[in-house]
Amino acid sequence: MSQTVTPGMRAGTRSAVALAFVLGLSVPCVAQAAPLAPAAGQLPACPAAGKEPGIGHEPRFTDANVALFAGGDYTADGGTAEAEGLLVVNGNATFAKTSGGVFNVGRVGAGSGILPPSGSVMLAVGGDLKIASGTTVDVGHGLTAGPRYGGSVQVGGAIDGKGDLVTNGGSRASGMGASAALSPYASFGDTVRRESASLAKLKPTGTTTVSGDTVTFKGGAGAGSGPQVFEITAAELDGTSTFLFTSIPAGDAVVVNVTGGRPVGISPMSVGFNGDRADTYDSAHFGEAASRILYNFEDSTSIRLGGGGNFMGSILAPKATADLTASTNGRVYVGGAIRTHGSGNESHNYPWTGSSTFDCKPTPPAPETPGTPPTAPPATSRPTPTPSRPGEETTSPTQPGTSTPTPGTPDQPTPSSSTTPPAGGGKGGGSLATTGGQVAPYLVGAAALGAAGAAVLLVTKRRRTRI
């Protein structure tokens, strides 16, 4: 039997087909903009020496060691954006972005990709956790694959959540007491003081020259026999902005011992490493420089990293407070309070290769015993880590003999998205969680349009069958 098709039916059919065709092209493109992050348990435990990655979007390695440590309080306000890796705060932690928005912890939008294992503790606070209205603290964003999800939070005191705390499937616990919440890093401040004193005793192996706002560190002989050690006074370092590391033997870690107790304020603008600029995001030596350099402020009482550039290398400052508007690339271990309040500035987790204490660790160490003697001077060779098994637990919520807190209900995992790295040399780029929030409505809209298109085709087909 012949069928008669009216012009209106043709138009409806063409519209439905066109809609289906457009969705068929557009939905995969949107989906590609928001890939799920791989499970951290499926990643290599630590990068090989000399293979530290540059800035990227996706998880690459796991690291159970502390990335940022505040012996006092930790405050993230202003327009600061992200803290990559495990954040340990002895005191209170306050997140209060001036205009609201997201502050990422654990996994960030663009960073080293060296993260705590999925589902493990990424934020440990000995005191209270305070989140201001309008601010979202997003822990372990996008780590939605594998046996565990997101990032967990342990708080010794109370959680004052006027804003939002999102753990993406990770657990949360409060009222634990400081010792249990910070375990196994309850005595990490002692470790920082001990290692700083040990490094400060090392004799210089290279020369330091200061000219205006530029400091040149020239390495000496003895590659492989230990770190390259330099010395500079706090007064000389104060006010500088350009740092040149020259003649550094391949594979050697770098220690810059800063002497004197006066406050130090610098605004990093440029960092050179063996003739190449290393502080731009497109530098092939970005990860290498960040992982090999450490500044040891044994007696400084105050450190300020101003501007919006990239500070390259780890910071060891057992007696200092820190004020940050520049982005940091390395470990940040401060005995006092830390305030980060720049415009999009970030903390990227790059383990320091000069000491097994501060290097990348596949699993956290056992709690330290008070009175442990100082460790030997750091070696330059990185020990070969034992890869963690998929799903292996990396932290314990309580120590034997402590009370067990009542954890909250884990958040449901949410999809992730990748973001564009910040422009070379500039301040940090967009929040991963914010980008995910921007992409999600398009995914939902695309799904709705797809359903609408399918419905139009179905109705059109039924009408044609009845005629």
Image (tube, helix red, strand yellow):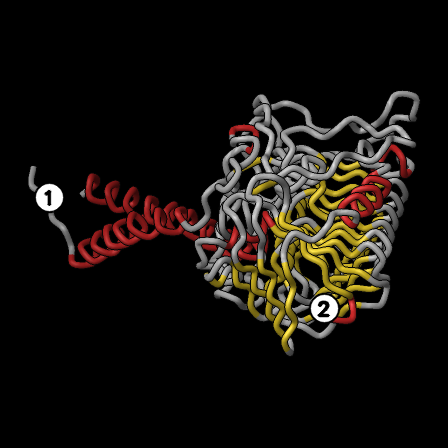
Please say if 38 is above or below 422: above
- Which residue is at 28% across, 54% downward? 22
Please, what is the three-letter code of the amino acid marked with disc 2? Leu
- Which residue is at 26% across, 41% downward? 462
Tell me whether circle 1 and circle 2 mark residues in contact (CB < 8 Å): no
Snapshot quadrant of residue 149: top right
Please say if 107 is above or below 135: above
Q: Residue 182, position in %: x, y?
A: 83, 37
How many callouts does the rendering have? 2
> What separation in Å lies between label 1 and label 2 (alpha carbons)?
87 Å
Q: Who is closer to the viewer here, 301 or 31?
A: 301
> Quick one: label 1, few (<14), some, or many (20+) residues within 10 Å?
few
Q: Quadrant of the C terminus?
A: top left
Residue 3: numbered disc: 1
Q: Is label 2 in a helix, a strand or a loop?
A: helix
Q: Residue 261, position in %: x, y?
A: 86, 63
- Which residue is at 69% across, 40% downward? 358
Res. 162 visible in picture: no
Residue 237: numbered disc: 2
Horizontal side of 306 relative to 335 (left or right) equals left
Q: Residue 78, position in %: x, y?
A: 72, 68
Q: Is label 1 in a helix, a strand or a loop?
A: loop
Q: Residue 4, position in %: x, y?
A: 11, 48
Please, what is the three-letter code of the amino acid marked with disc 1? Gln
Q: Who is closer to the viewer here, 197 or 169?
A: 197
Furthest residue toward bottom: 212
Comes first in the chain, label 1 or label 2:
1
Q: Who is closer to the viewer here, 197 or 249?
A: 249
Res. 64 visible in picture: yes
